[in-house]
């Protein structure tokens, strides 16, 4: 069990690794880079991550996954009206527009998630949790009679996830959030009809 100071040091290392990966890519980042950015020595890095870079990458994946969901709250948990859905959509678009190429979700999926099975599991868990939250919102709107009962909530939530992923990928490549906006708007229009 870590002390408060130990937790703070470990968190500082993970945050530094996440920033390095977002800015430079996973292939370019070394433990020396992380140590320099976090102001920790190699002995501290291996104290908190005895298995080295792979264990640190897993910690970064877990942190980035938490951020993706946290950044959408409380809107994601309150998808009970069309105004709430619009507010959630606006939060998502603004978040990714602001983060641009330094997007934690993009890093998690394209950089970290494909390098280790454990990180892939973290990514899978995030996507499942996110899709379930969207599905719950769709079910609530169906119960209120705002979305047709014949809409498959799981498929619709999956389509929303794909719309976000595609829009974020284009944003990371082009710098424009326009495609993300279009994709989310079309998904919401589908749910409204």
Image (tube, helix red, strand yellow):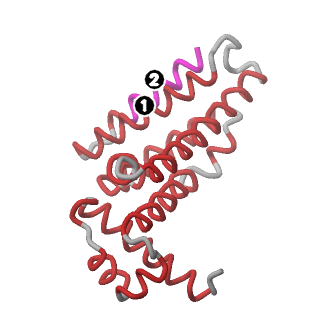
Instruction: Name the residue that disc number 1 marks.
Output: 163
Q: Residue furthest top?
A: 150
Q: Report the residue marked by disc 2.
A: 186
Q: Position of residue 45 (x, y in %)?
A: 41, 81
Between residue 146 and residue 15, name the one nearer to us. 15
Q: Is 92 above or below relative to 27?
A: above
From the viewer's perspective, tell me whether residue 132 is left or right of residue 26: right
Q: The C terminus lies in which quarter of the figure? A: top right
Total marks drawn?
2
Quarter of the figure with residue 39: bottom left
Residue at image location 36% in from the left, 41% down from the top: 168
Whole-percent x and y of residue 173?
Answer: 23, 43
Q: In the drawing, does residue 91 fall left or right of residue 17? A: right
Check if mark 1's residue and mark 2's residue have beta carbons within 8 Å: yes
Q: Would you place residue 19 above or below residue 64 in this image?
A: below
Residue found at the very far right of the displayed protein: 143
Residue depicted at x 36% and y 34%: 166
Which is nearer the N-term, disc 1 or disc 2? Answer: 1
Per the model, the C-alpha gap separating discs 1 and 2 is 9 Å
Q: Main secondary structure of the magenta part?
A: helix
Write the residue at 35% across / 68% down.
19
Q: What is the magenta range?
A: 180-193
């Amino acid at each position: 069990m870590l002390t408060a100071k130990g937790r703070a040091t470990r968190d500082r290392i993970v945050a530094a690794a996440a920033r390095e990966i977002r800015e430079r890519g996973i292939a370019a980042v070394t433990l020396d880079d992380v140590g320099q950015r976090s102001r920790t020595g190699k002995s501290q890095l291996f104290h908190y991550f005895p298995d080295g870079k792979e264990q640190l990458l897993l910690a970064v994946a877990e942190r980035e996954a938490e951020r993706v969901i946290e950044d959408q709250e409380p809107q994601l948990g309150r998808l009970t009206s069309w105004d709430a859905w619009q507010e959630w959509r606006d939060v998502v678009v603004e978040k990714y527009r602001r983060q641009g190429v330094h997007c934690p979700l993009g890093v998690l999926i394209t950089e970290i998630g494909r390098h280790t099975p454990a990180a892939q599991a973290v990514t899978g868990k995030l996507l499942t949790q996110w899709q379930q939250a969207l599905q719950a919102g769709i079910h609530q709107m169906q119960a209120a009679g705002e979305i047709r009962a014949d809409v498959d909530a799981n498929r619709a939530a999956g389509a929303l996830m794909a719309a976000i992923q595609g829009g974020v990928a284009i944003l990371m490549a082009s710098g424009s959030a326009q495609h993300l906006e279009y994709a989310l708007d079309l998904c919401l229009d589908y749910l409204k009809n």
